[in-house]
Amino acid sequence: MSPEKTVRRLKTYAGAQGYVYQYYFVGERAALADDAEASATEFVFDVTSDRKITYAVSVFLPQKSLAAWAKAHNRPLTDAEQYAAAKLRLFRAFDELEDVKAHGRRLVIDAAGLEEALASLGVE
């Protein structure tokens, strides 16, 4: 039997700054205890805009943002909804930052950003 190989789905996003990004989801984990964003879930994406250099982008979803959303909507977010929010935060960086590699490697989803992102998807 051959060892299992993880197949990553390389996706493309055309940012508003004129760059076309390719990215894939690497995984998620609890932010490291000594990280400035501790008490958060860290979603990690590998990103390239030139097909030569690939770099990691971390999107942090703090517990305080999750708690605020849950309180306002009387329910916790599902794992899929949390991933959707992280992906939308990544897309916002693609749209707003001229150089994601230099200025967008650590993105945070604050409570207002979480509310806005999920509302854009119709999540109540």
Image (spheres, rainbow, N blue to C red):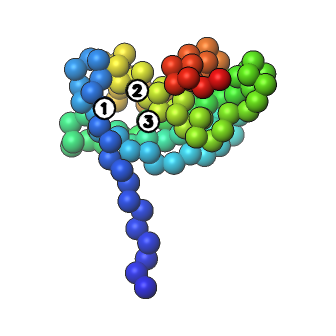
User: Residue 82's quadrant in the figure?
Assistant: top right
Q: Specify whether residue 54 is in view.
A: yes
Task: Compare residues 81 and 36 and report the one nearer the observer.
Answer: 81
Q: Which mark is residue 114?
A: none
Badge 3: few (under 14), some or many (20 or more) residues near its Cα, within 10 Å? many
Query: In screen coordinates, is 13 left or right of 113?
Result: left
The extreme bottom residue here reads 1
Residue 83 in the image: state x and y as whole percent. 55, 38
Q: Secondary structure at mark 2?
A: helix
Query: In screen coordinates, is 84 left or right of 4?
Result: right
Q: Looking at the image, is mark 3 or mark 1 earlier in the sequence?
A: 1
Residue 21 in the image: state x and y as whole percent. 28, 33
Q: Which residue does the numbered mark 2 point to in the structure image?
A: 91
Task: Compare residues 96 and 114 and report the one nearer the observer.
Answer: 114
Q: Which mark is residue 13?
A: 1
Q: Looking at the image, is mark 2 or mark 3 earlier in the sequence?
A: 3
Query: In screen coordinates, is 11 left or right of 69?
Result: left
Q: Residue at x 40, y 81 (%)?
A: 2
